[in-house]
Amino acid sequence: MKKFLFIPVLFLFFIRLSAQNKVELFPGSLTFQPFAANSLEPKLGFLFHTSENELRLDIGNSMDLVRYTDENSELAFGADMFTYTRLSKETDFHFPVDAVDYLFGVNFSYKSALDENYELGARLRISHISAHMVDGHYDKTEQEWKDNHTPRVYSREFLELMPYIKYKSLRTYIGLTYIFHVDPQYIKKDNYQIGFDYFIPWEPVRNISPYIGYDFKLIHLNEYTGNNSFVAGFKWGNKSGKGASLYYQYYCGYSIYGEYFDYKADYSAIGINLDL
């Protein structure tokens, strides 16, 4: 990790040289807004599966640490740190934890307004993910791991580049992920992505924004396979900032959890999310 320490140092030195423009430390908003249907985004909330005893808990955040602004564009350096957790539901309000993934890393983000309707932007992430089985996956009565699925080592370090173009409230994007280290080592190192999100103009109620989004990710295990994620919901608050969302998601493809990376998933779910 030491070889990556020069990145924030170089960034801070760069913006120091640009004192004639606006430089903010710890601005109160994100330059790059998370994509609505992308599964690997910072969230704070729950996703309840409708047809099986499973739910997802997200605890995490992304924040800009330093932002450089000129007349029409923003450049920021930030940090990501979050978990996404697979749980089940039992009586007496118990939610055993089956598996959990941890992500932390840094990011660079950029956006520029071309005119009053068009905007260009991009995010570059350098991140680490590790996955772990937890005691909720262990059958204490039988004294064995459920479904004969024992814990295994899973981790990856990767670069992710995601540029987008935005026209009014419609944002389309593509993505490229290069995994420069992974366990198990037979997993391939390239993934590709495309998608959109759209906040629908809606006047009846102020500060409530309907939205839809779709994300297609081509992942490379032994062969290329497509993951599909579709969302539709409402956001209360600032559609490009702080607020709360209630949404529906349909997902099919390989599981997002590292301990289940080669298991197929196909589900509908209802989600609640807070954007802080």
Image: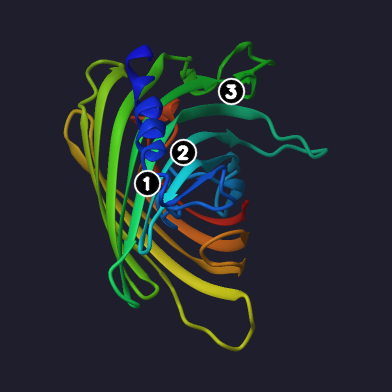
Q: Are marks 1 and 2 in contact (CB under 8 Å)?
A: yes
Is 160 displayed left or right of 107 in the figure?
A: left
Residue 255, visible in the rendered structure: no
Residues 191 and 173: in front is 173
Q: Residue 96: give x, y in percent of width and height.
A: 68, 30
Residue assigned mark 3: 137
Disc on the earlier residue, 2 or 3: 2
Tell me the mark number nearer the camera, choosing from 2 and 3. Answer: 2
Helix or strand or loop: what does disc 3 sit on?
helix
Between marks 1 and 3, how big is the CA–CA gap?
A: 38 Å
Q: Residue 80: give x, y in percent of width and height.
A: 49, 35
Q: Residue at x 27, y 52 (%)?
A: 163
Structural crowding at the residue carrying mark 1, measured as other residues with C-alpha within 10 Å and reported as few (<14), some (14–19) or many (≥20):
many
Q: Residue 143: give x, y in percent of width and height.
A: 63, 11
Helix or strand or loop: what does disc 1 sit on?
strand
Structural crowding at the residue carrying mark 2, measured as other residues with C-alpha within 10 Å and reported as few (<14), some (14–19) or many (≥20):
many
Quarter of the figure with the N terminus? top left
Residue at the extreme right of the image, as rendered: 92
Kind of residue sitting beneath label 3: His
Residue assigned mark 1: 109
Q: Which mark is residue 78?
A: 2
Q: Residue at x 30, y 58 (%)?
A: 195
Kind of residue sitting beneath label 1: Ser
Residue 114, visible in the rendered structure: yes
**How many numbered badges does the structure rendering display?**
3
Between marks 1 and 2, how big is the CA–CA gap?
A: 8 Å
Kind of residue sitting beneath label 2: Gly
Tell me the mark number nearer the camera, choosing from 1 and 3. Answer: 1
Residue at the extreme front of the image, as rendered: 20
Q: Residue at x 32, y 15 (%)?
A: 3
Helix or strand or loop: what does disc 2 sit on?
strand
Is 165 displayed left or right of 260 in the figure?
A: left
